[in-house]
Structure formats: structure tokens, C-alpha cells
Image (spheres, rainbow, N blue to C red):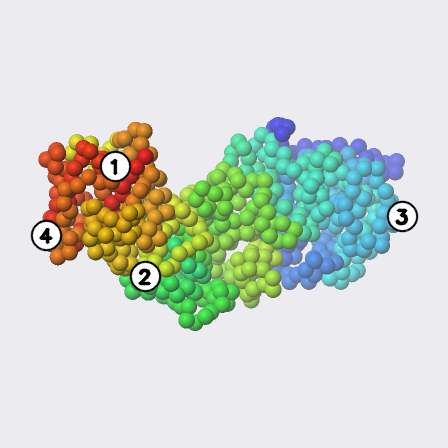
Amino acid sequence: PTTSAPEPVNHRFMLPLFISDGQKPLPFCVVDKLLVVTVATKETDGFRRFMRSAKHFNYSVKVLGRGEKWSGGDMSAPGGGQKVRLLKQFLGEMSGDERVILFTDSYDALFASGSGELLKKFSQAGHRLLFSSETLLWPHRLLEDKHPHVSQGNRFLSSGGFIGYLPNVKRLLADWSGADSDSDQLYFTKLYINPDKRKSINMTLDSRCRVFQTLHGALDDVVLKFEEGRVRARNVLYDTLPVIVHGNGPTKLQLNYLGNYIPNTWTFETGCTVCGQDLLPLSSLQELPSVLVAIFIQQPTPFVSVFFERLVKLEYPKDRLQLYIHNQEPHHESHVSSFLKEHGDLYQKITSVGPEEELDITVSRNTAIDLCRQNKDCDYFFNLDIEVVLKNKDTLKILIEQNLPIVAPMITRAGRLWSNFWGALSAEGYYARSEDYVDIVQGRRGVWNVPYVSSVYLMRGSLLRSELQDIALYNSQSLDPDMALCDNIRNQGVFMYVTNLQMFGRILSTENIQTQHLHNDLWQIFQNPLDWEERYIHPNYSRILKGQLMETPCPDVYWFPIFSDTACDHLVEEMEHFGKWSGGGNKDNRIQGGYENVPTVDIHMKQVGYEREWHKFLLDYVAPVTEKMYPGYYTQFELAFVVRYKPDEQPSLRPHHDASTFTINLALNHVDIDFQGGGCNFIRYDCAITSPRKGWALMHPGRLTHYHEGLPTTAGVRYIAVTFVDP
């Protein structure tokens, strides 16, 4: 992109106009005489964006209609006459031949440059009144033949913006006597296509979009142009840099996209320039806002117990939180009831809806919204779906401090570009990837205006009681509840944001969830490997790979931490839940040949459907260790099983060699707590390990050198997980 210096925002100079009106030269135009006029009956997010861009370039803006009821139609059909009436009334008593009036929409428009460039381009247009133009004729296509042809550019008038001298603008409005609901577009169009009126008013169109850029019908023509410290919109069809960008018609989302950059919201030099503006410091509040947290469980989901553990650890006063929990999945009833029993008393109020009530999810989500909407003390509504992994304990505080109407913390699926927001929509209203989607996902943007958020987001309670009141937000005839929510919000002109200023967490995959086991999370090593690791791998495991925590209690015997306490407990409980322990005899139909030389009381991983997952665990976590200790050997296991030692069942194991190149022996419970005695004795080296550590693995050669025995368990029950490994 072309680089140029940014235009100063303060202009105090006189600009000669090289146009003529008859034989009389036109006077100089003083920039201080420029007045921007717009109509805004209420302050929308779009209006605030417009005013920020005006302030950036030091425009003086007169806002008409504040506090009035809008009666100019919904703008999806011809209307807008109220704007003409208000402008005509305002200009009625105004005088001054040198005053220049810029009239523009503001809900869906923004400035891309300053008044100096604006007036220069107006001067060069050669007329005393310049209208915005567009490629499409609206509202009456039958008038097409009456429009004058242009040598280059758009042929049709757009009522969204015009600039002109006060006398000419007054002349433009003189014949208006329509109702507020009448079409301003049609009124101005009829004046323009009337040759006498057009000449009398001295009006023309900005056909090449040098001043005004309408987006409807021109989306492919408009791109971002990055300059030094600022961003412009560039019309590549006419190679122009418009001063005002107008998202007319169904192009509001494209304007939102452009507004994430223009005029200097984000640049390559500065990054996000507005991310630190208008924040709400919580330290300035006497009491933190009251928040309703709505939790939805719609399907079998892994790590639900971990979700509730993180909820409890959220850094926010529990007495300022109300919970609404809707669980549709019977499989998770135990998780919800356990949380409520242990922590329910901490919260201000809890509403729990179970699967037995068969409440539709759309109805449930609307019910949760209404609980906040109908409670004037509810400051925020925080949606938190069960598949959200909220790692940042300060998430709620961070979102509130952003001081935005709706904001979502950006979360992604681990290792993928899948996220909880969309950067753009297709023509049908479904997902489309925006040009900057990857940059947002990878944290290279900031706080971003987006058309869709889901799973986790914060909404102002006051918003639910104002712009979004009386709307069943999750209702739609054709859209899913999450898409319906965003569609209904967009239709009210409310902006939704996603922030990636900090790391917040991720979102779980809920595909191929198993529910037939006691601890189904054990099976998540493929679908959600990062969450599986956090749950089941020893917190000190990473130190092993750095050469730390690796002990050698006996020659060529390595001892290192690998399983968390939770992993040990879950694996033991899973085996006991399965319950089909071998008898400890030599005859064993589970193995090739049907005969076991050195039998144990055990359950094979294959019996509980865990062979594939155990192999993945070995490849991901044991193989890096074995390849470091035994270079050239690779972890391909032959057999894996859990052994149970009990004094009255099988207390010990006679001396033997393992049928392996090397063996992994993983202790699953605590000596002196869960059992007495036990351990492993390497006979050739007269070296015994009598205090096995829970979650630690012994790795030793299986054949030839390391003849060993299992020492007697004298009390309690000892469990170990054994894996025979061969290259």
C-alpha cells in the first residue's frame, strides 16, 4: 500500500473555490464555516462511532432530533422524511452565503479524512451542491431513464449524504412538505432528474466517490488502504479515497469491518488505538456489579467437573453472582448436584433446571435473559456454555472493565482456527471468513466489532432493558438460538465485540463423546488432548524433559513422575467398576497361546476399551522419555494391564523376567496410605524400591539383566499399571 503522512486534524485556513455561478466568482470558503449536520433520535453504537471519527478530524457536528421519537420508517422501505423536515427547520433561520453544510447519515457512516480534503474535493466538483451517489437505483426503478448519464462513475443519487452552500441547500429543501414517513430518497431524486431544478440548485453527483462512498452495490470496489498511522477506504474502481464511508442498505456489517480500522482504530504502526479508551475501572466502584451467570449443558461434554472447579475459582465475589444452570443431559446430573451441594451456598442465588423438566433450549436461554432483564439490580448477563474452558480467573472483571454493550472473550479450539466468533457473514447469514479472521484468532488485533459471538459473552443488563427490551432474543423461524441471538442484536443496531487482548481459554470438542464409562474423561486424549494433559499428566512432567526429576534408584532403572493423582484414581476406579479381574492363574485366554508364565490378578486395557488411548499416552508422554534414556528404541507396546495386589488375593509376584525389551511400571496409589509393603526388587543388583510414589513410573529392561520380583503387600490394596514395550 501507498504510504503518506496523516492529514492534520485541525484546519484553520481559507480555501479558494474555483467554481462559478453565472458570471460572479464564488467567495472563499472558510473551513470554520463548515457545519456537519446529522439526525439521531437516539444514541446508537453506530452513532457513537460516527462521532468518534468526527472528533478525530475536529469536525463540528450538529445533531438534530435528539430525544424525538423516530417516525421516519424502519429504513428497509422508503422513508426518512423526518430527516428532511428536521434539517429544513434547523436551517430556516440560518444565514450566510459562505456557510457550507454537510448533511450525512450517522448511524451507518464514518469519516475517513478531514475537512481540508473534504472542501478541496467539493471545490473541484464544480457545483454548489454535491450529492452522494450509488450504483443501484432506489426506490423506483422506473425512473432510471430519466437520470442523466455520466462519463464515469455512479449514475444514481443517494440521500445518505450531501454537501453544499447554505443557500443551495435551502433551495433543495424548499419544496419539501411531505410526511415524516415519506421517502427522502425519492424527493431528492425527483429534484435531480428534473433538469430545471438540477440547474437551479446547481447540484451534481459525486459519481466517482471522491467525497462519499456508499457501500451498497460496491463491496467489491472498496478496500482498506493503510497509510502511516491511519487507514483509508479506497475505491479501486475509480482509484479514489472517499472522505465519508456510508454503509447504506444491507452493508452495515461491511461498514463495521471497515470501522475496525478507519480512521485510525487499528494501524500497523500503533496497533489498537481505542482498546484502552472509555474503560470502566472496577477500582473506582464502591461495589462490584451484580452478574447473572447462565450455564447451559445441552449434550454430553467432557471435563464438566473441571468446568465447575474453574467456576468456583473465578475471581469475583460470589455474593455478587447469581447462577442459572440448565442441564439437558442426564449423564451430567451427578456433576451438577455435586457442585450445588459443595458450593451452592456461596452464591447470591441459584436457579437449576434439570433434564426431567424437558425445557426447550431456546425457551431456557430466553428465560435466563429475562431473569436479568426483569431485575433492575442485574447489571450484567454472562453466558457461559459448558464446553468453555475459562482459564483466566479474571475474565469476568476484564470483560466488565471493557465497558462495552456486548463483549466476548476470544477462545479457540486447541490447535485449530475454530473460535467463538465470526469475522463475517455470508449472504445467507451463515459463517464467512473475514480477511482479518486469522489475525484476530492469533491475537494480532485487539477489541473487534464482529457480527457473531457464541458460547461465552457478557451483556449489559441495562441493554436488555432498553434497546433489546421486549425481544425474545433467541427466537427465530429458521436460525439456531445462537445465530438468532446475534441476528436479533444486529437488527437493533447494537454492536458485538470480541477481545483477544489477553488469553482467556479455549473451547472443548464435543464430538464422539463416550458416556458408557465411569470416568469418560479418560478417553478424551484424542478429542481434547490439552485438557486431557492438564487433568491427567503429572504437573512436574515437563521437568523430566529438561533433565530434572529423573532418578536412578537402581542400575538402568529410571524413576520419573508422569500421572496426576486424578489420573491414578480414575484408572483404578475404572478398573474396579469394570470388575472382571483375572484369577491369577496360568491359563489366560486373553493372550496369545492362552498360557501365562507369571500370572497376576489384572485387567487388560483392551478389556475396558482403553488400548488405543493408552497407546496414545505412551507415544505422547512415555516415548520422549524412553528415547532419551534408551536411544534407538521406540515405544510400541505389546501388552498393558492394571495389576491388583492384596494380602488375601495375590500379595506378591515371584522372581521373573518380563516379556519385553523394557517395562513401564506405574504406581497408582500411595504406600503407607492405601497399602503397606509392596515394591520391586531387582535381584541381580540387590536393589529394591520399597516406597513407590503414586503417579511415578519405573522404567527398566525386561529381559536378561533385570530379573525382579514384586515384594509382598502386607495390608490394603496396591495397584500398578504395567506396560511391556518392544521396538
| Residue at the disc numbered 1 | 662
Compute the Cα span from label 1 to label 2: 43 Å
Q: Amino acid at mark 4?
A: Thr
Residue holding disc 3: 196
Circle 2 — which element?
Answer: helix
**Sequence-first tag of 1 and 3:** 3
Q: Are marks 4 and 2 in contact (CB under 8 Å)?
A: no
Look at mark 2 in the image and give the residue it sits on.
Answer: 339
Compared across the picture, whether 141 is left or right of 220 comes to: right
Are circles 4 and 1 on residues that touch, CB within 8 Å?
Answer: no
Tell which circle, 1 or 2, labels the residue nearer the N-terminal end: 2
Mark 4 burial class by Cα count in 10 Å: few <14, some 14-19, many 20+: some
Question: Which residue occupies the foreground of this view, 19 or 283?
Answer: 283
CA gap, disc 4 and disc 1? 28 Å
- Give the residue at the far bottom of this rendering: 357
In terms of secondary structure, where does tag 3 sit? helix
Q: Is residue 54 above or below residue 628?
A: below
Q: What amino acid is at disc 3?
A: Asp
For marks 4 and 1, the one nearer the N-term is: 1
Q: Residues within 10 Å of mark 3 (few under 14, many from 20)?
A: few
Q: CA distance from mark 1 to mark 3?
A: 99 Å
